[in-house]
Image: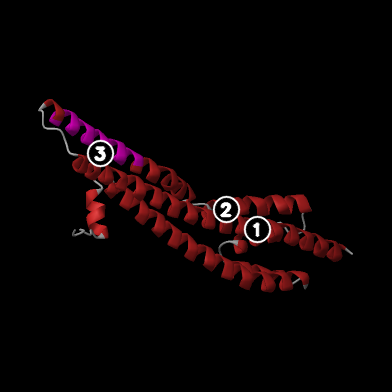
Amino acid sequence: MAVDFINAWGIFLKGGPMMWPILLLSILAITVGIEKFLFLSTLERSNNKFKPVFFKALRENRMKDALGACEDNAFGLGNICKAGLMKFGNSVDLIKASMCQAAGFEVHVLKQRLKLLAFIVNAAPLLGLLGTTTSLCVVFHASQMRSNALNPLSLGDMSSGIWQALVTSSAGLSVGIISYAIYCFTASRVNDAVVVFEQTISETAGILQAVSELDRT
């Protein structure tokens, strides 16, 4: 008995019209994942390069050099630390408040498009389920019509229709799983960056306060 094989494109076409929005969601998830990976990697390298230079200048009371380091690294920690330098000479609470406000804008940038990934995680399986139920409705409606005409569908015909219906569920679940993995990996790196922001704020505020007290003596 000969067995017919079908390629991936053929399976995609057999899945019906719901396969197209699922494909679109998969492209979006991968695109966002790559964009966030590149952005966060660049941010991490920038932070690792910035922190030693900045803190060395800060501890040596070279505020102009510290400010120059912030301006050379004009995103992420650079903006946050610059906000703290602008409040040099004030209380620790005021310095931290200024830096936290700047950090809020940077965290907002970090979290951009995470909601889109979360949407894809939930939408892809639902679209797959919708495609399956729609296809099953067509199969069973055809079965009813053929039965009324005294020409019922064969088991093979019904199995073929149900198999095609399940393709969309498989595709939706696959995209949902991949998107969830991308979301978890990205969210974890964002949380790591936020922790670095918080640690830097505390360390910078403490050093600025210590340097300010030395200047008064």
Regarding mark 1 in the picture, which secondary structure is present there?
A: helix
- Say few, some or many: other residues with alpha carbon within 10 Å of mark 3 (under 14 / 14 to 19 / 20 or more): many
The numbered mark at residue 197 is 1
**Other residues around mark 2 within 10 Å, as few (<14) / some (14–19) / many (≥20):** some
Apparent side of residue 194 relative to residue 186 in the rendered image (left or right): right
Q: Which residue is mark 2?
A: 107
Verify CB contact (< 8 Å) between mark 2 and mark 3: no
Q: Position of residue 20 (x, y in %)?
A: 27, 49
Looking at the rendered image, the quarter that the N terminus falls into is bottom left
* Start-end of magenta stretch: 129-146
Q: Residue at x 80, y 59 (%)?
A: 209
Q: Sequence order check: which comes first, mark 1 or mark 3? A: 3
Tag 3: amino acid: Ser
Q: Amino acid at mark 1?
A: Phe
Horizontal and vertical percent position of residue 96: 72, 53
Locate residue 43, reporting x and y percent.
Answer: 55, 65
Residue 65, above or below 118: below
Task: Sort mark 1 into few (<14), some (14-19) or many (20+) by Cα contacts within 10 Å.
Answer: many
Name which of mark 2 and mark 3 comes first in the sequence. Answer: 2
Task: Give the residue drawn at x 49%, y 55%.
Answer: 181
State yes or no: residue 141 in magenta: yes
The secondary structure that most of the magenta stretch takes on is: helix
* Circle 3 residue: 135
Q: Nearer the viewer, residue 161 or 21?
A: 161
